[in-house]
Amino acid sequence: MKKTAGSAAAKKTVAKKTAAGAGAAKKTATKTATKTVTKKATAKKTVAKKATAAASKTVPPAKKTAAEKPAAAKAPARKPESRVALVRRARRINRELAELYPYAHPELDFTNPFELLVATVLSAQTTDLRVNQTTPALFAACPTPEDMAAMDPERLEELIRPTGFFRAKARSLLGLSAALRDRFGGEVPGRLEDLVTLPGVGRKTANVVLGNAFGVPGITVDTHFGRLARRFGWTTQEDPEKVEADVAALFPKSEWTMLSHRVVFHGRRVCHSRKPACGACGIAPLCPSYGEGETDPEKAKKLLKYELGGQPGQRLNPPAGFPGRPAPPLGAPAS
């Protein structure tokens, strides 16, 4: 029995030694494998670094795209403007425009309310210059509403043909002349509510006549005025009557007529529709839309029109104090 127990113990001892030896062998094999993998990985990294270094010497770095460029290059966003700040800025713009255009005036030739009314109706869809070149012959042929109402339609159409849309305009002129003759004793009325009842006369035309023939303040919202009012941040509206209401709320009533002339003058000479001359604009620091047009001063100067660009004005008979040259008669070359 003792021999049997001794042999069993011996067997256990042998098994333990065998297991320990196997464990040690496994550990050694694992360490060897780990070292081999590490060496291979290190070798790969070294090769990759060398390849990257070689490539950087021969290939120039890629340029940054517009999306990758720093945001600082963009113009800073404008802070919201309070109502008080808007009114102050708007009135300062008006004062600056008054200094820039002390000679601002209606750019239609006229000597009485009837001539101004007719000229304003004709100015739709054409330039004041073309109207001024057309009206001398027209007023010579029919100087009064009675004369115009009695004119042969084809003869009237021929006289106003250079202004475009002459058939529709002839109908309006015949209709308003007859209305003046029959309802107002041959006189142009001095009230807006009466003027807008005449054929071809809307609120804009009525305000032109009231402001310049009767001294009644009014804001004239034509294409130039509306464009600049939006660029100046005075309104966001497109409808002329809404633009008129927004702008009227910013200024005293006594300024309305001259404000209209100054803004239109600036729109025709500097703040053009397609390419404003921002670099030659006297009110650029006050304009939230600065930069929409040409900002280089020398290039911007070449965009100026009429007297600012050394060209004739729009009136054949400009008022005293106008610094530019008169416009040439119809058919004469502009010099």
Image (tube, grey):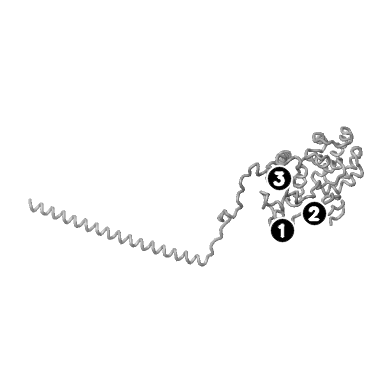
First reached walking from the N terminus: tag 2 or tag 3: 3
- Can residue 296 be seen at all in this image of the molecule? yes
Amino acid at pointer 2? Glu
Q: Which amino acid does label 3 sit on?
A: Arg
* 273 vs 308, nearest the viewer: 308
Q: Which label number is shown at residue 187?
A: none
Bin the neighbour count of mark 1 within 10 Å (Cα to Cα): few under 14, some 14-19, many 20 and up.
some
Please provide percent x and percent y for residue 172. Answer: 84, 38
Please state if 225 lies on the left or on the right of 10 as rendered: right
Residue 17: x and y, percent?
A: 19, 57
Residue at which label 2 appears: 307
* Mark 1 → mark 2, Cα distance in angstroms: 17 Å
Q: Viewer-proximal residue, 41 or 143?
A: 143
Q: In which quarter of the image is residue 33?
A: bottom left
Point out the tag, 1 or 2, that comes first from the N-terminus: 1
Please give the name of the residue rendered at 71% of the width and 39% of the height, measured from the top-left corner: 249
158 vs 296: above or below? above
In the rendered structure, are the residues bearing label 2 and label 3 in contact, judged by CB atoms less than 8 Å apart? no
Secondary structure of residue under mark 2: helix
Counting residues from the N terminus, which is met first, the one under dot 3 or under dot 1?
A: 3
* Label 3 environment density (alpha carbons within 10 Å; few <14, some 14–19, many ≥20): some
Q: Which of marks 2 and 3 is in front?
A: 3
Residue ID for mark 1? 299
Residue 132 lies, in percent from the top left, at 85, 48
Horizontal side, residue 80 vs residue 7: left or right = right
Determine the residue located farthest toward the top in the rendered image. 183
Q: Is mark 3 on a helix, strand or loop?
A: helix
Which quadrant is home to the C terminus? bottom right
Residue at which label 3 appears: 91
